[in-house]
Image (tube, helix red, strand yellow):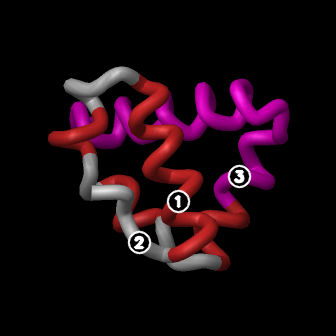
Amino acid sequence: MTDEMRFFIFLIETYAYDKQLPTAEVLKTWEEKELVQKIYDMYEMYHIEAIENAYADIDNLVKTGKHLW
């Protein structure tokens, strides 16, 4: 398993926990909005930032389809 995939799994699980949602529901939302690859591709940025920054960017992606930066 790649570092990117390990981080993606960590990210989705912690994001779901933080939002008090089932992980499957978070993944379903990301899939419906076609965000899975966009989020996965942000590994280089997300893994060096505070996790809350990743959450804020993901929240914006879910709402608008665009990154915060």
Residue 12 horizontal/vertical position (percent): 56, 39
Q: Is residue 16 above or below residue 29?
A: above
Q: Earlier in the sequence, mark 1 or mark 3?
A: 3
The magenta segment: 1-27
Q: Earlier in the sequence, mark 3 or mark 2?
A: 3
SS for callout 1: helix
Question: Which residue is situated farthest in the front direction here?
Answer: 69
Q: How many residues crowd mark 3 within 10 Å: few (<14), some (14–19), many (20+)?
A: some
Between 16 and 3, which is closer to the camera in this rendering? Answer: 16
Residue 32 horizontal/vertical position (percent): 66, 78
Q: Earlier in the sequence, mark 2 or mark 1?
A: 1
SS for callout 2: loop
The residue labelled by disc 1 is 60
Instruction: Identify the amino acid type marked 1.
Output: Asn
Looking at the figure, which quarter contains the C terminus? Answer: bottom left
Q: Are marks 2 and 1 in contact (CB under 8 Å)?
A: yes
Residue 1 horizontal/vertical position (percent): 29, 36
The residue labelled by disc 3 is 26
Q: Is residue 40 left or right of residue 19?
A: left
Residue 66's disc is: 2
Dominant SS of magenta comes to: helix
Instruction: Identify the amino acid type marked 3.
Output: Val
Q: In whole angstroms, how far apart are the C-alphas of marks 1 and 3?
A: 14 Å
Mark in front: 1 vs 3: 1
Between 23 and 66, which is closer to the camera in this rendering? Answer: 66
Residue at (73, 42) in percent of width and height: 23
Residue at (71, 52) in percent of width and height: 26
Mark in front: 3 vs 2: 2
Q: Is residue 32 left or right of residue 58?
A: right
Q: How many residues crowd mark 2 within 10 Å: few (<14), some (14–19), many (20+)?
A: some
